[in-house]
Amino acid sequence: MKFCFLSSYAHLALDPASDRVSGGAELQVALLARELVKRGHEVVIIGGDIGQRDGMTFDGVITRTGGKFQTGGLLDTLLAVPRVRQVLREEKPDCVLILGWTTWLYLLHRLRVRNYRLVFICGLDTEVNGEFRRENPIRGAVFENGVRGANIRFAMSEYQAEQFARQRLSCGLYRNLILPRAFPRTAEKDVDLLWIARCQPIKRPHLFLDLVERLPEAKCRMICPREDEDLWQSVFARAQKIPNLEFIERVPYRDIQAHYDSAKVFVNTSSYEGWPNSFIQSGLGSAALLSLDVNPDRLFERFLPGVFAGGQFEGLVNGAKKLLETPEALLAAQSGCEQFVAELHDNDRNVDAFLQGMGVG
C-alpha cells in the first residue's frame, strides 16, 4: 500500500543534516512513516518548501515539496493547493494522512484528485471534544466537516476514542511511537526541573518561570524554540534574569533525549495536549512528571509517574518540592514513568494497531 502524509516539516525530522526543531505531531508523522517503510509499504511525505530539493529519500521515505505552506494557515494553504494536487497526481497514493488540526483536512476531503482514502489522526483533545470549534467557530466548523468526511479516523488516547464515539464517528486507537535512542542512557541527573516545548500560548512558558522563581535552590533548564515571536521575546528577556535557570532556544531531534536523561523531573504547564511526546521521552529518560493540567487517560492515577497539580499552581510548587526533597518519592515516580512507557508504547505493537485500523495486514 502507498501512504502519503501531508505535514509541514515532518520530513526534516528524518533528515540527519537538519537542525530545525519542530513539534510532536511532526515527529510522530516521521516515526510512523519510517515504521511503515519497514513493513514494506511505500511512503511519501509532502512537506512545506523551505528550499530543500524535491524527491529526497530518508530511511526509505520519499519527501516531496508541497509549496510554501505552514500547516493550519489558510492563505498559504490555498496558494499551495495546485502544487499539492500535482504531487498527489504524480504519486497516486492509496491513502492520504493528516495528523492534527489543519485546513488541509477539509481541502483534501473536498478536492480529491483521485480515489484515495483520507485518514485523520487526532493530535489534541480539543480537536475532538468540541473545544476547538467553540474557540474558533468558523475554522472549527470547517475542520469538523473534514473530520466527518475522513474515511478512517484514529485516536491516540482512550479519551479521544470516547469523544469520537459520542459523535457516532468510528475510529481506531493507537499510541504515539517512540523515537529510538541514538545511544544508551549514561547521563547523570544534574538538572532538577526541565521544561521543553515550542513557544506557544497554550504551552504557557511563563508559568514555568514562575515555578523556577519559587524554587531558587533548584537547578532548572528550559528549552523553548521560538514560534510566537512576541511571547518568545518576553520569555527570553525574563529568563535571562533568573540565576538558577539555563535557557536554550533549540535542540535538534537527535540530541533532545539527552536532556530528558539528565533531568530529575519534567514539567508540563500546557493548558491542553493530546498525548505528549515529552511524557514518553521522560519515561525513556527515567524522569518523573510534574503536570499542571495535562493528565491523559488518568495517567497519573494509573501509573503514579509523578505529581498532577489539577490546575492549581500551588499544587505545582508543592509537587516540585515533594519530588526534589523526598528521594523515595522521586525514585518511585521515575519508576512509574518508565513503567507507563514500557506498557503503552511498544512501536511494533502500536504499528500493528495502526495497520489493523487501516484494514491492512
Image: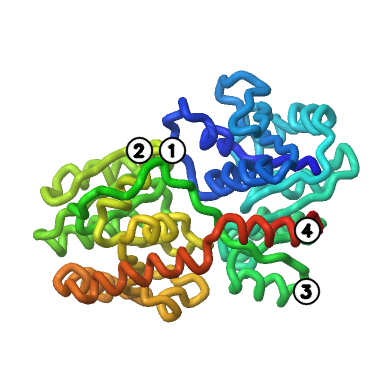
Task: For marks 3 and 1, give the CA distance.
Answer: 37 Å
- Residue type marked 3: Arg
Q: According to the image, label 2 marks what residue?
A: 250
Q: Kindly identify which residue carries mark 1.
A: 21
Q: Position of residue 289 (x, y in %)?
A: 34, 66
Alpha carbon of mark 4 to alpha carbon of mark 3: how far?
13 Å
Relative placement, left or right, of 252 versus 23 is left
Is the residue 239 above or below the residue 21 in the image?
Answer: below
- Give the residue pinned by disc 3: 168
Along the horizontal axis of the image, is 26 left or right of 271? right
Q: Amino acid at mark 4?
A: Ile
Confirm or deny contact between disc 2 and disc 1 (CB under 8 A).
yes
Label 3 crowd bin: few (<14), some (14–19), many (20+), radius 10 Å: few
Q: Earlier in the sequence, mark 2 or mark 4?
A: 4
Secondary structure state at the residue bearing disc 3: loop
Q: CA distance from mark 2 to mark 4?
A: 35 Å
Picture coordinates of residue 120, whole percent (x, y): 71, 54
Q: Position of residue 192 (x, y in %)?
A: 20, 58
Type of amino acid under label 2 = Arg
Element assignment for label 2: loop
Q: What residue is shown at x 32% (from left), y 74% (from top)? A: 307
Locate the C terminus by quadrant: bottom right
Asked if disc 2 and disc 4 are in contact, CB closer than 8 Å, the reply is no
155 and 129: which one is in front? 155
Viewer-side residue, 353 vs 102 = 353
Q: Secondary structure at mark 4?
A: strand
Q: Which residue is mark 4?
A: 152
